[in-house]
Amino acid sequence: MTADPVRASVRRALITAIAISAVTLAMATLELLMADWPSGFVLLGVLPLAALAFCGCALWSVTLLLRIKDGGAKFALPLLIYALTLAVLVYAPLQQIALQQNFYWHRQNRERIVARVEAGELRPNVSHNRNLIALGDGEPKVSAGGNDIVVDETDAGSYVLFLASRGLKHSFTGFLHVPSGGDPRKFFEFEDKPPSQLVRYDKDWYFVAN
C-alpha cells in the first residue's frame, strides 16, 4: 500500500527538524568543552555548516506554511520545532549546564587527585614545564589537553587546575582548586593578568578562564 504523500512529507520534515535541532543544541551545549586543541579547529568548520543547515531548513519550514490550507496545521510543526530550538539557544544557559555537569561528574576523582598532589604523591613530571603533571592513561580522564593538570605550590598550599579547554596562545578554561580559603587570583597563571572569568562553584573550587 502506498503511503499517504502528505503524511510522508510531514514526517520527513519533522524528522529533519528534530535531527538538525538536536545536533544544534548538542553543539551549542558542548562548544566550550570541545574547544580544546585540536577539536577546536574541527569546530571552526563544523559550526558554520551546522548554523547554515539550521537556518536553511528553518527557512524551508516556512514554505511549508503554504500547505496548511490543503494539508492541515501539521505542516506548521517543523517551524515550531525550529522556533523552540532558537528560543532555547537564545535564553537557556546551555554551556553553564554542561560545565555544572562536568564539575559534579568528575568532582570525586579530581578531589582524590588534589589530595595526592597535596600529599606529594603526584609531582610535576613534564620536562619543559615545571608546573605540569601528565596524569597519563592510567588515571581517570579529568582534564582536557591529554589529561594534564597544572599545579602551583605556594606557602598557603597547592593550587590545582583541571583544564576544561585549552586553545592557542596559551588560552584556557578550567576548574581551579585552591588551598583552604585561598584566592584564585593568586594562581601563578594570573600574575600578569587577572582571570577573564571567575565563578565560584563550591568551597575552594572555581571555574576560571584567562
Image: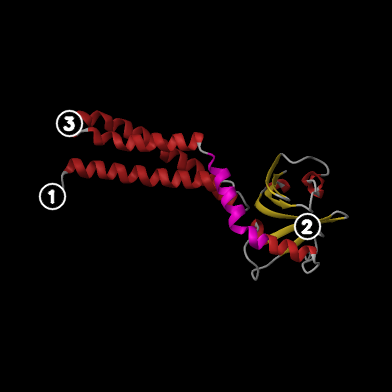
**Picture colour scheme:** secondary structure
Which residue is drawn at the image coordinates 58% and 43% (left, top)? Answer: 96
Which of the two discs, 2 and 1, sits closer to the camera?
2
**Disc 2 to disc 3: CB gap under 8 Å:** no
Q: Point out the tag, 2 or 3, that comes first from the N-terminus.
A: 3
The one nearer the camera, 187 or 165, is 187
Query: Magenta span covers which residues?
Result: 93-110
Mark 3 lies on residue:
70
Q: CA distance from mark 1 to mark 3?
A: 20 Å
Which residue is drawn at the image coordinates 50% and 46% (left, top)? Answer: 27
Q: CA distance from mark 2 to mark 3?
A: 66 Å
Give the vertical position of 140 relative to 59 (above or below).
below
Q: CA distance from mark 2 to mark 1?
A: 66 Å
Question: As shown in the figure, which amino acid type bears the numbered disc 2?
Answer: Val
The one nearer the camera, 128 or 3, is 3
How many neighbours does mark 1 have within 10 angstroms: few (below 14), some (14-19), or many (20 or more)?
Answer: few
Query: Residue 151 bears which disc, if any?
Result: 2
The one nearer the camera, 180 or 170, is 180
How many neighbours does mark 2 have within 10 angstroms: few (below 14), some (14-19), or many (20 or more)?
Answer: many
Q: Position of residue 196 (x, y in %)?
A: 71, 39
Question: As shown in the figure, which amino acid type bears the numbered disc 1?
Answer: Thr
For the C terminus, give its image quadrant.
top right
Q: Position of residue 150 (x, y in %)?
A: 75, 56
The one nearer the camera, 97 or 80, is 97
Question: As shown in the figure, which amino acid type bears the numbered disc 3?
Answer: Asp
- Is residue 122 visible in the rendered structure shown here? yes
Overall secondary structure of the magenta section? helix
Q: Residue furthest bottom?
A: 138
Query: Residue 2 bears which disc, if any?
Result: 1
Q: Residue furthest left?
A: 1
SS class, disc 2: strand
Which residue is drawn at the image coordinates 56% and 52% (left, top)? Answer: 101
